[in-house]
Amino acid sequence: MRQRAITAVILVPVLLIVLAIGGPLLAAGIVAITALAALEVFKLLRGAGYPTFAMLGTALAIVVVLDAAIPTVQGSGPLLIAVGIVLVAVAAFSKVDPREGLTTWMATVYGALYVSLLSFVLRLGDVAPALPASSPIAGLGPERAWILLLILSVWAYDTGAYLVGKRFGRAKFLTHISPSKTYAGLIGGIVSTSVVVALGLWAVGVNPIHAVALGPLTALSAQAGDLAESVLKRAAGAKDSGTLIPGHGGMLDRVDSFLFAAPVVTLYVVAFLA
């Protein structure tokens, strides 16, 4: 716990500084995180018995995130993904056993697309509505303000679920995936996320009533992201995705919740707020 606290004290200010600067530095940070998380994903897939083209899959994930940072043409994201699927399929032709080739193709595409969900952190900033002049954080601009709302909301879920689950958690759910998850923690995480989302929406000049829906959606998607990584780690027989961050495991362990929460929040903003 002490090591985790020390690491958090170092990493959190760095993250907030990168977010405050925004622009190319933020995009570069997301690309770097994607690359590190991708390498961990492909390592876990190999541990689970699925052969992959790790470098090709990592490159595909990075290209999808770069496209979110520097969009080229309309619909370029799906186009790049389609080309990536084709390239991985061609690479899989090198496998003598067609069953191994199919498995390698599927696992590589899965790993790349799974990690590239981080691109929605940048896409959220791109589609976010403008902040009114009366907003208390108008100086941040919509990109940084909405990404900050996403980060704080996911952190709120993790914190609320941990504290409430530790204090009141008895009944557990999905123990075959993660033995520590409790219903009390789930409820605590939903409540804490909804409160933070409401405050965040007020800060960006949006009616906080949207937190009634966006709060639980963010919380549940963050939990689903955590459980999805747990499935991968269980299949690989690994406790953590890596050892990159002392006391916290690997990069994937730190961003798993964002992989699912970012696209859900982005969809809500596009559908109801943009």
Image (cartoon, helix red, strand yellow):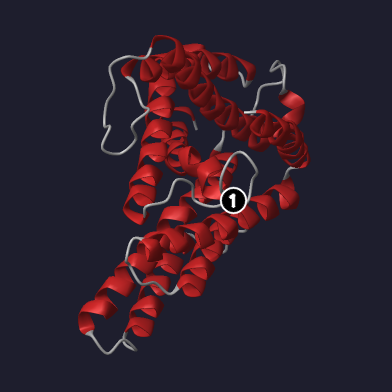
Quadrant hosting residue 170: top left
Which is more toward the observer, 180 or 116? 180
Where residue 247 appears, as percent x and y from the top left, is 62, 39
Q: Is residue 142 visible?
A: yes
Left or right of residue 23, residue 34 in this image:
left
Q: Residue furthest left?
A: 99
251 lies left or right of 187: right
Residue displayed at 41% across by 18% down: 190
Q: Residue placed at 34% from the left, 35% from the top? A: 178
Residue for point 44% across, 19% down: 189
Query: As displayed, is residue 251 above or below residue 131?
Result: below
Local secondary structure at mark 1: loop
Residue furthest to the top: 168
Q: How many marks?
A: 1
Name the residue at 39% across, 31% down.
Answer: 223
Up the image or down, 244 lies above or below 111; here it is above
Residue 15 at x, y = what percent?
71, 39
Looking at the picture, how far across and down is residue 149, in whole percent? 59, 27
What residue is disc 1 on? 243
| Residue 73 is at least partly visible in this image | no
Q: Nearer the viewer, residue 19 or 51?
A: 51
Instruction: Give above or below for 121 relative to 273.
Output: below
Mark 1 residue crowding within 10 angstroms, few (<14) / some (14–19) / many (20+): few
Q: Amino acid at mark 1?
A: Thr
- Residue 44 horizontal side relative to residue 129, left or right: left
Residue 128 screen position, x and y as percent? 56, 35
As rendered, which of 83 and 228 lies closer to the eye?
228
Quarter of the N terminus within the rendering: top right
